[in-house]
């Protein structure tokens, strides 16, 4: 089954089916069945993709489908996938299923909660398979509104403020993206004065350097807002800290990857000379985000804030890899998108399980959880070890690949940026080990913790699923590298043409 439209329609149909369920049990099982089938569809897509490549299909995009949407502006429903988008779809399916399982105990407005989670996945799938820039933008917007409602209704703390801040920041980023896409549309002439949003056709055009200098910042910064580009990262700590557990998993695991994917697929790929021109700026901002995020995390006392600020640092690695513009670094950036997606979903899932039982996220009030809820505590430790880049986990593979690719830039500026980024690993180890040591190890600090119950079957299932993803990348990364390397080479060829075009 390779019809990509099914990937969009199925979660939408599941979301609508949830609205017709009569009780909470029906809602949960419908959402679970729908998300499980999403993972099966994504797995079948990956299998079909491998089969096509093994059969010698060298097309840039596979399983393409094209239908006119608004002919007056040459807007099309044009979809297709390559290795990079396939692995992003797989990551999304893992996080969606895990988020549904973790949310099994939701009692307040259950129907609306699961509907919004599934609607968010519709936007993510549509974004990753879109090859028409307007269609891609449409699905990007579809993914914004559910985030706002999930935080504003089911969140905690300053949830209204956090939801509004997130929505305004992301809509501001979307506005920048829209300006960049419109300028790209009108500056691209495919013959007889015809303009297009077709990503593939635009990639074959040579857009003048001055135009790329104008457009690239709008596209890169606009998408960068979604992936915590410094200094537009401030929505991340507030948004994550106030969001319910599944929403935090979706925000960090999926939504922040929309930005990284857009920075690579749209800004860098379509504007190669602009990427070359602004490369040093990107590297500088990414390095600041990595260092700032790491040290800001050191100051946090709340488990969710610790993970939220660390996400700023880890997403800085994605932008650093893209900004270095070497093949190895870009492969590392894609690996980091996938690694951080599953790792941070596991992390937020563990934090949610701890909070549901102890009713606190403050590190100083926790302790001894490894004795009372060993499964939950072990999941938190596993997520922490992946975050600090321990060999055998996905974080090590992705970050080391970025560092190796970054070191290929021989000038002093890029070497210094690489060294500073490497040094942040030490800071990461400090805050991860300190938080894990105080929160889950040591003596039991509250006698009530002796009465805690360990993870339920749904929580265990979600944790095992995400742990499997983390370990499958960390222990055997070659299948993933082989999947994305050919498509990374196409990006490098476009970058080379940009240099030659100068």
Image (cartoon, helix red, strand yellow):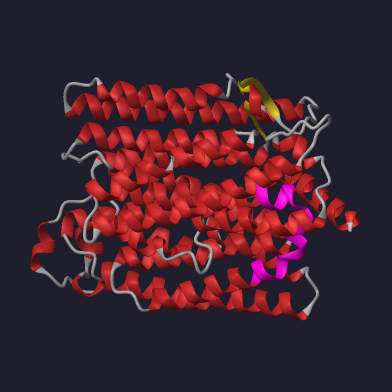
Q: Magenta part mainly helix, strand or loop?
A: helix
Seen in the picture, residue 162 relative to 94 is either above or below; the reply is below
Q: Which residue lies at the image location 40% right of the left edge and 26% below the top edge?
A: 12
Using the rendered image of the protein, determine whether residue 265 is visible from the camera's viewpoint.
no
Between residue 411 and residue 484, name the one nearer to us. 411
Please indicate whether residue 438 sits to the left or right of residue 209 in the image. left
Asked where in the image residue 143 lies, by quadrant, the reply is top left
Give residue 142's position: percent from left, percent from top: 44, 37
Q: Quadrant of the N terminus?
A: top right
Determine if the magenta segment contains residue 275.
Answer: yes
Q: Position of residue 134 (x, y in %)?
A: 59, 36
Where residue 218 appears, as percent x and y from the top left, is: 62, 56
Quick one: 182 or 107, which is closer to the camera? 182
Residue at left 19%, top 72%?
365
The stretch of residues the image draws in magenta is 265-283
Residue 427, relative to residue 86: is it above or below? below
How many marks the image carries: the answer is 0
Q: Quadrant of the C terminus?
A: bottom right
Q: Which residue is rendered at x = 45% and y = 78% of the image?
A: 295
Magenta span includes 31:
no
x%, y% of residue 335?
Answer: 61, 52
Q: Residue at x 63, y 65 (%)?
A: 320
Question: Is 381 positioned to the left or the right of 283 in the image?
Answer: left
Question: Is residue 242 toward the left or the right of residue 451 in the image?
Answer: right
Please say whether residue 108 is visible from this viewpoint.
yes
Q: For residue 157, what is the image quadrant?
A: bottom left
Q: Where 499 falls versus 6 (above or below)?
A: below
**57 lies left or right of 67:** right
């Amino acid at each position: 089954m390779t019809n990509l439209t099914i990937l969009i329609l199925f979660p939408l149909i599941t979301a609508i089916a949830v609205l017709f369920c009569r009780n909470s049990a029906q809602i949960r099982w419908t959402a679970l069945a729908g998300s499980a089938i999403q993972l099966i569809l994504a797995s079948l897509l990956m299998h079909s993709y491998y089969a096509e490549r093994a059969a010698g299909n060298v097309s840039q995009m596979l399983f393409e489908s094209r239908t006119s949407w608004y002919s007056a502006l040459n807007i099309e429903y044009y979809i297709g996938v390559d290795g990079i988008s396939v692995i992003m779809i797989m990551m999304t399916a893992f996080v969606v299923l895990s988020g549904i399982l973790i949310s099994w105990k939701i009692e307040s407005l259950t129907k609306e909660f699961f509907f919004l989670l599934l609607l968010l996945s519709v936007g993510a799938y549509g974004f990753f398979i879109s090859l028409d820039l307007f269609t891609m933008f449409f699905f990007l917007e579809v993914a914004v509104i559910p985030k706002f409602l999930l935080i504003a209704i089911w969140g905690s703390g300053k949830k209204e403020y956090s939801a509004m801040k997130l929505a305004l920041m992301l809509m501001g980023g979307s506005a920048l993206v829209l300006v960049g896409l419109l300028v790209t549309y009108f500056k691209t002439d495919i013959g007889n004065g015809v303009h297009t949003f077709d990503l593939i056709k635009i990639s074959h055009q040579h857009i003048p350097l001055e135009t790329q200098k104008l457009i690239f910042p709008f596209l890169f910064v606009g998408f960068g807002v979604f992936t915590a580009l410094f200094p537009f990262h401030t929505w991340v700590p507030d948004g994550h800290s106030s969001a319910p557990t599944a929403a935090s998993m979706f925000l960090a695991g999926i939504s922040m990857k929309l930005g990284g994917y857009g920075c690579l697929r749209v800004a860098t790929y379509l504007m190669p000379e602009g990427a070359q021109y602004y490369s040093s700026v990107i590297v500088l901002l990414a390095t600041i985000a990595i260092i700032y995020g790491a040290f800001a995390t050191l100051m946090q006392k709340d488990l969710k804030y610790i993970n939220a600020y660390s996400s700023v640092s880890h997403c800085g690695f994605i932008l650093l890899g893209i900004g270095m513009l070497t093949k190895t670094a870009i492969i590392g950036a894609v690996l980091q998108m996938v690694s951080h997606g599953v790792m941070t979903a596991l992390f937020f899932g563990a934090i949610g399980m701890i909070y549901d039982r102890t009713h606190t996220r403050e590190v100083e009030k926790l302790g001894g959880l490894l004795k009372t809820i060993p499964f939950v505590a072990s999941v938190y430790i596993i997520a922490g070890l992946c975050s600090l880049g321990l060999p055998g986990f996905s974080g090590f593979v992705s970050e080391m690949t970025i560092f190796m690719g970054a070191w290929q830039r021989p000038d002093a500026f890029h070497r210094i940026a690489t060294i500073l980024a490497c040094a942040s690993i030490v800071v990461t180890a400090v805050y991860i080990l300190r938080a894990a040591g105080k929160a889950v190890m040591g003596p039991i600090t509250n006698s009530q913790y002796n009465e805690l119950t360990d993870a339920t079957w749904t929580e265990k299932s979600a944790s095992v699923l995400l742990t499997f993803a983390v370990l499958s990348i960390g222990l055997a990364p070659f299948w993933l590298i082989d999947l994305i390397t050919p498509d990374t080479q196409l990006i490098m060829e476009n970058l080379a043409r940009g240099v030659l075009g100068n």
